[in-house]
Image (tube, rainbow, N blue to C red):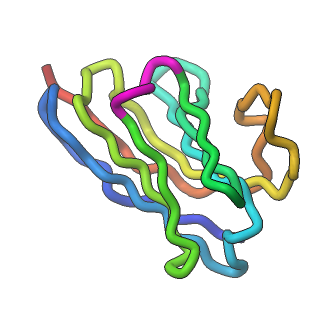
Amino acid sequence: VQLQASGGGLVQAGGSLRLSCVASGRTISSYHMGWFRQAPGKEREFVAVRSWIGGSTVYADSVKGRFTISRDNAKNTVYLQMNSLKPEDTAVYFCAATATRSWYGTRWSPGSMDYWGKGTLVTVSS
């Protein structure tokens, strides 16, 4: 499956952005879909993941209550709604997919995912 993220940009602190990730090649309906980010000089980190069925979600503590991951299987697209953005949210954001059926107890990390898209840059100014 090929993934393409978009929607990044420059926003002031407190603002909002919605990222989109369009998949091609395969339907995403049977994949857990996630978002990760990588700030300059830092390792890639987990942001959010949504299960392939049932709508379960997991968020990093740093974004809980501010970010929402959603998916539209009919459009083969996953979204990340980001509200109340902070300068520390500045990073390149990547969408990713995994075919694993594991969910409960999974410690989500970049190594958990099978497919990656190119990132989209989000810059939050103070």
Nearer to us in this view, 67 or 42: 67
In the rendered image, the vertical position of residue 88 relative to residue 76, given as above or below: above
Q: Is residue 114 left or right of residue 83?
A: right
| Residue 64 highlighted magenta (yes or no) | yes
Residue 115 placement (x, y as % from top left): 73, 56
Side of 119 relative to 101 (left or right) = left
Image quarter where the C terminus lies is top left
Residue range of the region highlighted in magenta in the rendering: 61-66
Q: Say above or below: 115 vs 4.
A: above
Q: Viewed as shown, does residue 45 lie left or right of 21? A: right
* Rendering coords of residue 33 (x, y %): 64, 53
Instruction: Report the predominant secondary structure element of the magenta stretch.
Output: loop
Is residue 90 magenta-colored?
Answer: no
Q: Quadrant of residue 85?
A: top left
Instruction: From this view, report whether residue 124 is shown above or below residue 9.
Output: above
Compare residues 113 and 117 and report the one nearer the observer: 113
As drawn, the residue found furthest toward the front would be: 54
The residue sitting at 51% across, 34% down in the picture is: 37
- Indicate whether 46 appears above or below 121: above
- Image point 80% across, 40% down: which residue? 103
Report x, y in % for residue 50.
Answer: 61, 49
Q: Splitting the image into 4 quarters, where does residue 19 fall?
A: bottom left
Give 7 or 83, whichever is nearer the viewer: 83
Which residue is at 26% across, 47% downward? 17
Position in image of residue 125 (x %, y %): 16, 26
Figure label count: 0
The image quadrant where one finds the N terminus is bottom right
